[in-house]
Amino acid sequence: MNSNIQTASVPATSRRSLLRAAVAGSATAGSLLAFGSAFPAAAAPAGAAEDVGERPTTPEQALRRLAEGNRRWRAYRQQHPNESPAVRTRLTQGQHPFAIVLGCVDSRVPPELVFDQGLGDLLTVRSAGEVLDEAVLGSIAYGVLELHIPLVLVLGHQSCGAVGAAVHADETGERLPAHIQYLADQIRPSIDRGAQGEARVAATIDAHARRTRERLAAEADLAGAIAAGRLAVAAARYDLRDQRVRLLTP
């Protein structure tokens, strides 16, 4: 598949046999490459696309749609799809998003903008550093099991403050305030101790996205959908400098 979401690789860590089994049966990131009174009525925004066509139903189709949207975003040629009055009315009857994006809370990385998608296209789940907890896992499971979404994309990003804080706390032994320490504790197993300084933070961002992907793929309910070929779980990194999303290979 031709895709403008590029790949970036870092030496992979060893995985448990369960993870191998879960991912082996899926279209993984690598194989996917081979996102009062009522207000007065208003017209659809100029240049907005009412509908971008059929909903992707396979992991490959979903990833291709995200890649196309990211390409438009980088070129400043956004279509702002699925914002028209007709689409808004149709969505009152239900939703059929084609991808789940687990991203960071960072205000610079909103998935609908980064992938140039509109209403009803993405199920977005956001937590600082893409950290998993029961609410995040339940939200993703809902998208897969109830909405039959074929792709889960873990989206890390350059200059992630949560990862930077986790690395700093690990290096200094400093205790972070309040619930921020929980985030650092969840990110710590992904810290790349083979790098130093900013390179350590950058490498840990990728390693943590990969580890989160692996943890999701090992979830029993998700692993079943993967084994049946209905779901793929992929990891990627968004770079603030060039606005490009790059897939992270295993």
Image (cartoon, rainbow, N blue to C red):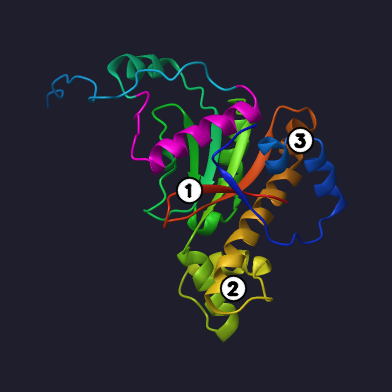
Report the mark closest to the observer, 1 or 2: 1
The answer to whether the residue labelled 1 contacts the one labelled 3, judged by CB atoms less than 8 Å apart, is no
User: At which x and y percent is residue 107?
Assistant: 37, 53
Q: Nearer the viewer, residue 141 or 110?
A: 110
User: At which x and y percent is residue 235?
Assistant: 62, 48
Q: Which residue is mark 1?
A: 244
Residue 49 versus residue 63 in the image, above or below:
above
Q: Secondary structure at mark 2?
A: helix
The span from disc 1 to disc 2 (Cα, nearest Å) is: 21 Å
**Kind of residue sitting beneath label 2:** Arg
Residue 8 versus residue 56 in the image, above or below:
below
Q: Which residue is mark 2?
A: 200
The answer to whether the residue labelled 1 contacts the one labelled 2, judged by CB atoms less than 8 Å apart, is no
Label 1: few (<14), some or many (≥20) within 10 Å?
many
Magenta highlight on residue 52: no
**Kind of residue sitting beneath label 1:** Arg
Q: Main secondary structure of the magenta part?
A: helix
**Residue extent of the magenta highlight:** 57-82
The image quadrant that residue 76 belongs to is top left
Q: Which residue is mark 3?
A: 26
